[in-house]
Image (spheres, grey):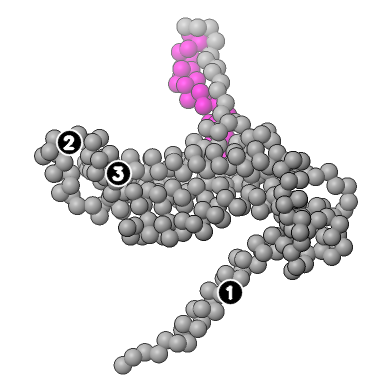
């Protein structure tokens, strides 16, 4: 008996179309608004007919704001976050899979526990650590007044990473999700590879770089692209870790765009132009590399 699934398919297609419209309509409205000039927007508001001032708006935003520098900051931080996450994920997964011990399961459980602790729950602690990364050294040196006993005053080293690229990047690179994916992938690799490499005299580092790394190329590239887009859109921590206009990221900079208009209605065409400029990089990455991302995350990279 052949089951008739035409009605199910029609419902699925309708839901897919509705979801696409839900995501694309705001983008289309933002782009159309970005093509208008301010007087036209004041007269007619949001329209469905694109204007002819998009490139003029881009030039104006480029010249009047610090958004170009902030977009560059987004690129640097997103690249640092994605590469840092992949380095930690690859090396940690390699150690957990190929160097098993009685404590491996506990270490793996502790790593996965970080998935249940999002960054937002640790904002206060992370800010305190980033504001003075030497505080642990001070705490250890001042236990029992040891430092003051020999040097007269308590140790008070101070080294702040606020308003720096490392201060934005480092707290965001430790993630259990990427490690989980890499561990599950490496567990699919034949165990005989490690035995054969050992018999050939390959060291653990050579086995990692010459065998495991090439085989992990698909998931690593896919996760790097995925976490680059994810890092580009981060808002909460960059908002807290950076305060100067030259160090905030593009997403944070959008909330601070000021074109000096005194009218009651803000200059939404320029604001939408800035939003489009910030969004273009992740949109291009998703459009160009979506097949590689999907194949890499499902371990089907060819």
| C-alpha separation, residue under disc 2 versus residue under disc 1 | 55 Å
Please report the residue visible at 30 percent of the width from the left and 44 percent of the height from the top.
Answer: 213
The x and y percentages for residue 110 are 36, 44
Residue 114 at least partly seen: no
| In this picture, residue 124 sits left or right of residue 181 | right
* Residue 146 within the magenta-colored segment of the rendering: yes
For marks 3 and 1, give the one nearer the viewer.
3
Give, as a single range, the part of the protein colored magenta.
Answer: 121-149
Q: The N terminus lies in which quarter of the figure?
A: bottom left
**Residue 265 location, quadrant:** bottom right
**In terms of secondary structure, what is the magenta stretch mainly?**
helix
* Relative height, residue 294 to residue 107 (above, below): below
Q: Looking at the image, is mark 3 or mark 2 earlier in the sequence?
A: 2
Residue beneath label 1, please? 18
The x and y percentages for residue 220 are 37, 48
Q: Looking at the image, is mark 2 or mark 1 earlier in the sequence?
A: 1
Q: Residue furthest left?
A: 199
Please report the residue visible at 51 percent of the width from the left and 10 percent of the height from the top.
Answer: 148
| Disc 3 packing (10 Å; few <14; some 14–19; many ≥20) | some
Please report the residue visible at 76 percent of the width from the left and 41 percent of the height from the top.
Answer: 64
* Relative height, residue 1 to residue 258 (above, below): below
Q: The C terminus lies in which quarter of the figure?
A: bottom left
Residue beneath label 3, please? 213
Dot 1 falls on a residue whose secondary structure is: helix
Using the image as rendered, state which of residue 117 and residue 263 is in the foreground. Answer: 263
| C-alpha separation, residue under disc 3 versus residue under disc 2 | 14 Å
Please report the residue visible at 55 percent of the width from the left and 33 percent of the height from the top.
Answer: 165
* Relative height, residue 28 to residue 106 (above, below): below
| Disc 2 packing (10 Å; few <14; some 14–19; many ≥20) | some
Residue 231 at least partly seen: yes
Q: Which numbered disc covers residue 202? A: 2
Q: How many marks?
A: 3
């Amino acid at each position: 008996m052949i089951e008739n699934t035409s009605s199910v398919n029609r419902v699925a297609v309708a839901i897919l179309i509705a979801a696409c419209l839900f995501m694309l309509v705001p983008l289309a409205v933002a782009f159309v608004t970005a093509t208008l000039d301010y007087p036209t927007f004041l007269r007619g508001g949001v329209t469905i007919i694109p204007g002819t001032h998009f490139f003029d708006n881009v030039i104006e935003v480029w010249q009047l704001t610090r958004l170009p520098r902030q977009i560059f900051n987004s690129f640097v931080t997103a690249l640092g976050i994605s590469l840092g996450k992949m380095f930690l994920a690859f090396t940690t997964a390699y150690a957990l899979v190929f160097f098993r011990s009685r404590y491996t399961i506990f270490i793996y459980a502790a790593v996965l526990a970080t998935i249940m602790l999002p960054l937002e729950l640790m904002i206060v602690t992370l800010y305190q650590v980033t504001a003075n990364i030497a505080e642990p050294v001070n705490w250890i040196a001042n236990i029992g007044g040891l430092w003051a006993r020999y040097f007269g005053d308590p140790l008070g080293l101070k080294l702040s990473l606020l308003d720096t690229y490392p201060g934005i990047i480092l707290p965001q690179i430790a993630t259990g999700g990427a490690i989980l994916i890499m561990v599950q992938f490496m567990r699919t690799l034949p165990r005989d590879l490690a035995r054969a490499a050992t018999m050939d005299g390959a060291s653990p580092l050579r086995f990692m770089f010459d065998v495991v790394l090439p085989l992990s190329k698909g998931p690593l590239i896919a996760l790097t692209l995925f976490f680059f887009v994810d890092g580009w859109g981060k808002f909460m921590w960059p908002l807290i870790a950076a305060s100067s206009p030259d160090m905030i990221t593009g997403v944070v900079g959008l909330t601070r765009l000021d074109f000096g208009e005194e009218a009651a209605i803000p200059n939404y065409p320029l604001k939408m132009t800035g939003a489009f400029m910030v969004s273009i990089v992740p949109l291009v990455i998703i459009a160009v590399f979506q097949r590689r991302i999907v194949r890499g995350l499902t371990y089907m990279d060819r």
